[in-house]
Image (cartoon, grey):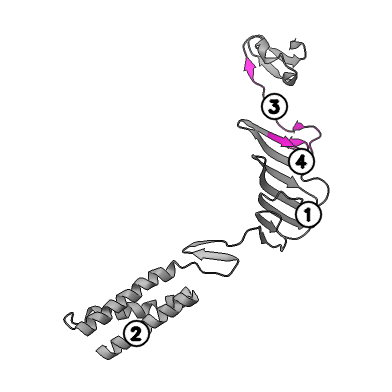
């Protein structure tokens, strides 16, 4: 490549990069990256003693440095911002996928009406031939929970799993079935067993002296007794 061609190509490249920085269209620069790389290699072959050539080589290096700056310029429309490999919402409010009226920080919906939401969290709704349904992962008052709803009217949830304390997990709103899809009690176990804690001898009286402890049970493996906590203390069933 002649010196004139090299100088011309470098000048065009510099003007091109400056235009990219103004427009924010870094994808256009990527298409010409190969061309700039070729120019850089060509420039490195020029005699270093020629001041004019050296000056234009320095200009090319400057243009190459501008490329790195262009790559890190936040681009996007007024709703989304892209920096490197990251993309985030540039506006306050909720993000909706499949809905124009998101009710949560992230609201994903298929078809059908929405469940009643809490704005802090993620909401997923949809429907099939059997009706509408939704799941919501959210928090309220510092308490995280997961809501399940199989209709679009009524309460905020049909069933809820909630962390009520550091070591306490509650299931609220209905019955829990293990081995059955139609539980008739708060806990129903089908085709299996409920295994109780065991002890040797009568359980401590301190474990059955409050109203919220009534209903506790324990198995005595040494005497083959079942202990049940009532309001008056442990009752032995032999």
- Please tell me whether mark 1 or mark 3 is closer to you in this view: 1
Can you say whether 95 is above or below 14 in the image? above
Helix, strand or loop: magenta stretch: loop
Residue position for label 2: 11
Residue 178 visible in rendering: no
Q: Which numbered disc, 1 or 4, marks the residue that appears first in the sequence?
A: 1
| Relative to 169, 182 lies left or right | right
Magenta stretch?
A: 170-199
Determine the CA span between mark 3 and mark 2: 81 Å
Q: What element carries label 2?
A: helix
Residue carrying label 3: 194
Q: What residue sits right under mark 4 in the picture?
A: 181
CB under 8 Å between callouts 1 and 2? no
For label 1, the residue is 132
Could you tell me how far apart the alpha carbons at marks 1 and 3 are, in whole angstroms?
A: 34 Å
Residue occupying image coordinates x 66% and y 61%:
97
Residue 173 placed where, x, y %? 77, 38
Give the foreground label among 2 and 4: 2
Q: Can residue 156 be seen in this view?
A: yes
| Alpha-carbon span between mark 3 and mark 4 | 17 Å
Up the image or down, 77 lies above or below 1; here it is above
Q: Closer to the camera, 39 or 59?
A: 59
Q: Residue 83, percent across and down?
A: 48, 64
């Amino acid at each position: 490549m002649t010196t004139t061609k090299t100088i011309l190509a470098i000048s065009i490249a510099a003007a091109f990069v400056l235009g990219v920085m103004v427009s924010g269209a870094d994808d256009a620069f990527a298409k010409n990256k190969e061309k700039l790389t070729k120019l850089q290699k060509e420039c490195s072959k020029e005699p270093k003693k020629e001041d004019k050539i050296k000056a234009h080589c320095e200009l090319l290096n400057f243009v190459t440095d501008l490329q790195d700056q262009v790559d890190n310029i936040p681009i996007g429309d007024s709703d989304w911002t892209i920096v490197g490999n990251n993309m985030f919402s540039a506006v306050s409010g909720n993000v909706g996928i499949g809905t124009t009226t998101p009710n949560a920080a992230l609201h994903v919906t298929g078809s059908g009406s929405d469940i009643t939401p809490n704005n802090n969290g993620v909401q997923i709704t949809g429907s099939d031939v059997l009706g509408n349904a939704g799941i919501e992962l959210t928090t309220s008052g510092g308490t995280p929970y997961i809501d399940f709803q199989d209709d679009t009217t009524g309460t905020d949830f049909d069933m809820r799993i909630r962390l009520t304390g550091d070591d306490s997990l509650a299931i609220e709103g209905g019955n829990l079935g293990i081995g059955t899809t139609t539980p008739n009690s708060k806990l129903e176990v089908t085709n299996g067993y409920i295994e109780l804690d065991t002890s040797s001898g009568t359980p401590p009286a301190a474990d059955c002296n409050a109203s919220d402890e009534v209903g506790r049970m324990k198995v005595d493996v040494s005497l083959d007794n079942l202990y049940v906590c009532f309001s008056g203390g442990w009752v032995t069933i032999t």
